[in-house]
Amino acid sequence: MEPPVTLRPLQLADLGRVDQLLREPQVARWWTSDTTAERELERFRRRLVEPAETATRMYAVELGGTLVGWCQWYRWQDYPSEAAAVGAGRGEVGADYAVGDPGAIARGVGTRMVAALVSEIWRHEPLAGLLVAPQAANTASRRVLEKNGFLLVEVRPVSTEPHNRPMAIYRLGPPPAS
Ligand SMILES: CC(C)(COP(=O)(O)OP(=O)(O)OC[C@H]1O[C@@H](n2cnc3c(N)ncnc32)[C@H](O)[C@@H]1OP(=O)(O)O)[C@@H](O)C(=O)NCCC(=O)NCCS
């Protein structure tokens, strides 16, 4: 049986491992193509050192208790320029994620991570819709969204991105009323 995929709040002590995962080619290709691992790590570090100053919540992704990736979510309204450019609606939430451990990729971990992240977001924001926009060429990222019920809305460049490559904009509605 596959070990469980779980999320827990990311901690400063995790950043050494996250640094390694960020530099794995399959992550670097998408996550640091327009920046550097050092800059990203510094952004992560600042969020963890000053949690009150950040609108982004970060999590370690564990497979059977081993850190294999990370993910994060935020309210688009806390990033108004980006929200306007991507077309985020009132109250919508955005998310980003990575599975970096080469032994963990392409075996369903990313799909289960996104399911866990959606549950976590709805625990905090029960009425929120989600809007997530990977690069259109990022097939694996698109598939993990599609396999979790996200629907493709639009494919186009987004002016606040540091590049002009098309983004695939996906939405998942608020949770069904129980
Ligand atoms: C996106 C990511 C989290 C997917 O994680 P994963 O654990 O490999 O995903 P899964 O095993 O759940 O696979 C999901 C789907 O993606 C497909 N897939 C996985 N790796 C792929 C690749 N390199 N190219 C094309 N498709 C791929 C799988 O075949 C599966 O689709 P299928 O069911 O139609 O066969 C992982 O590839 C990753 O971290 N990528 C780098 C960071 C990134 O792109 N983050 C997203 C930025 S928005």
Image: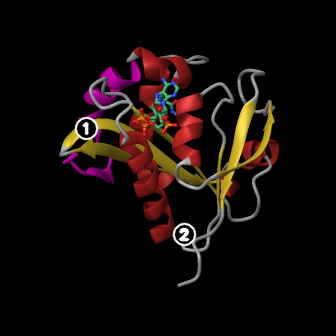
The residue labelled by disc 1 is 67
Q: Which region is colored magenta?
A: 1-23
* Secondary structure type for disc 1: strand
Q: Nearer the viewer, residue 116 or 50?
A: 116
Q: Tell me if residue 28 is in the magenta stretch.
A: no
Q: Nearer the viewer, residue 139 or 51?
A: 139
Q: Residues within 10 Å of mark 1 (few under 14, many from 20)?
A: many
Q: Nearer the viewer, residue 2 or 59?
A: 2
Tally of marks: 2
Q: Residue at x 46, y 49 (%)?
A: 114
The residue lying furthest to the front in this view is 1
Above-or-below relation of 62 to 31: below
Q: Residue at x 34, y 35 (%)?
A: 107
Amino acid under disc 1: Leu
The residue labelled by disc 2 is 125
Q: Is residue 51 left or right of residue 56?
A: left
